[in-house]
Image (spheres, rainbow, N blue to C red):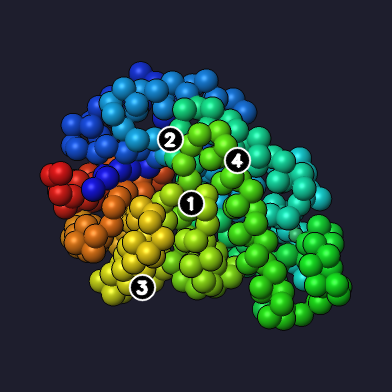
């Protein structure tokens, strides 16, 4: 079984190497290096050094589009949406929201460039992390209940090409189907590029079956010719779910789909924003469920239980991190 953690917040290779050594000493053989818009613009060679340092320690390297366009997961900002306000998603009520549109041609070109740069770092796997449409409930903005994304010019044009009718203002079944197909087509295009350049693809779907948060039918992704690793992140405390059934259900889901479609299965363990009481024990239980459930790969988000991100860190970070490491099998 592969064992890993995400790594971020340190861009000095001398410092990072000490952390990577520590991970290797504790048996981790995979690392996800976050690769934000800022990293792409200002730290590309530094990032290539971090990737090389991981490879020197026999770690399989994943790289993710951290917060890119604000349509992937992550505590990173997007300069793209500031420079390209017309590439943002548009609510059905007309307002723009602070997230890029998957159908916008400028954003697609931007992500193609990000993808080339990500593989050029030396990444083994590009990790498409929580791709999602703008979800009003995750943000403070006052948005009417019936509002939905995206009804920008690019989406309306594509919808019309596809269905031969103009895009409705209400959220019909066809709109939901279109949104999901749009996300899949975006991922297919980027995953094909990754494969062409000789790396592999992982997609991490948010748990749940909503089209805004990902895909209603995970099979449509699992059957992609370009996919290698099917992942999900059943973060029980973040989603306010009961730990055991939640982690078990999603472990079973990715393991069985991965078996059926000859993919690797991967489960992420919540190592941030945990309750003050009992966090290490929760992490131990969740990790064991993923391991016993037969996941091919288990990761924690993130290293040292996000000690260095105060907005989501956990008081008990050392105990949480060690609980994760201790619950992993030796081999
Ligand atoms: Zn759009």
Q: Which mark is residue 193?
A: 4
Residue under circle 3? 241
Decide which of tag 2 and tag 1 comes sooner along the chain. Answer: 2
Pointer 1 residue = 227
| Mark drawn on residue 185 | none
- Mark 2 vs mark 1, CA separation in Å: 13 Å
Answer with the quadrant where ligand 1 appears in the image: bottom right
> Residue at horizontal 28%, vertical 26%?
57
Horizontal side of 93 relative to 266 (left or right) equals right
* Mark found first going from the N terminus, 2 or 4: 2
In this orientation, does residue 33 appear? no
The residue that label 2 is drawn on is 124
**Please, is residue 138 above or below residue 15 in the view?**
below
Mark 1 nearby-residue class (10 Å; few <14, some 14–19, many ≥20): many
- Residue 223 left/right relative to 249: right
Q: How many numbered callouts?
A: 4
Mark 4 secondary-structure assignment: helix
Callouts 3 and 4 close, C-beta under 8 Å: no
């Amino acid at each position: 079984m592969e064992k890993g953690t995400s790594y971020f917040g340190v861009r000095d290779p001398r410092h990072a190497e000490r952390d990577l050594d520590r991970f290797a000493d504790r048996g981790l053989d995979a690392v996800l290096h976050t690769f934000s818009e800022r990293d792409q613009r200002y730290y590309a060679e530094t990032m290539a050094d971090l990737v090389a340092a991981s490879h020197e320690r026999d770690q399989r390297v994943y790289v993710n589009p951290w917060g890119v366009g604000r349509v992937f997961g992550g505590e990173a900002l997007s300069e793209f949406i500031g420079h390209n306000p017309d590439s943002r998603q548009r609510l059905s009520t007309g307002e723009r929201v602070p997230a890029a549109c998957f159908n916008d041609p400028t954003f697609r070109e931007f992500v193609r460039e990000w993808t080339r740069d990500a593989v050029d770092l030396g990444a083994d796997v590009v990790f498409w992390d929580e791709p999602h449409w703008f979800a009003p409930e995750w943000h403070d903005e006052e948005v009417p209940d019936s509002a939905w994304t995206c009804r920008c010019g690019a989406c309306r044009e594509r919808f019309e090409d596809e269905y031969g009718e103009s895009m409705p203002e209400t959220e019909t079944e066809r709109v939901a189907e279109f949104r999901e197909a749009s996300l899949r087509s975006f991922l297919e295009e980027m995953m094909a590029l990754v494969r062409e350049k000789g790396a592999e693809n992982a997609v991490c779907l948010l748990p749940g079956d909503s089209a805004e948060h990902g895909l209603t039918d995970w099979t449509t992704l699992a059957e992609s010719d370009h996919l290698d690793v099917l992942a999900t992140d059943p973060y029980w405390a973040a989603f306010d779910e009961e730990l055991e059934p939640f982690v078990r259900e999603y472990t079973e889901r990715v393991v069985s789909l991965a078996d059926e479609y000859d993919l690797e299965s991967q489960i992420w363990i919540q190592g941030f924003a945990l309750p003050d009481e009992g966090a290490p024990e929760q992490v131990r239980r969740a990790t064991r469920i993923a391991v016993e459930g037969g996941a091919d790969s288990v990761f924690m988000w993130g290293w040292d239980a996000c000690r260095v991100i105060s907005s989501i860190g956990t008081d008990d970070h050392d105990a949480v991190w060690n609980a994760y490491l201790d619950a992993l099998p030796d081999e």
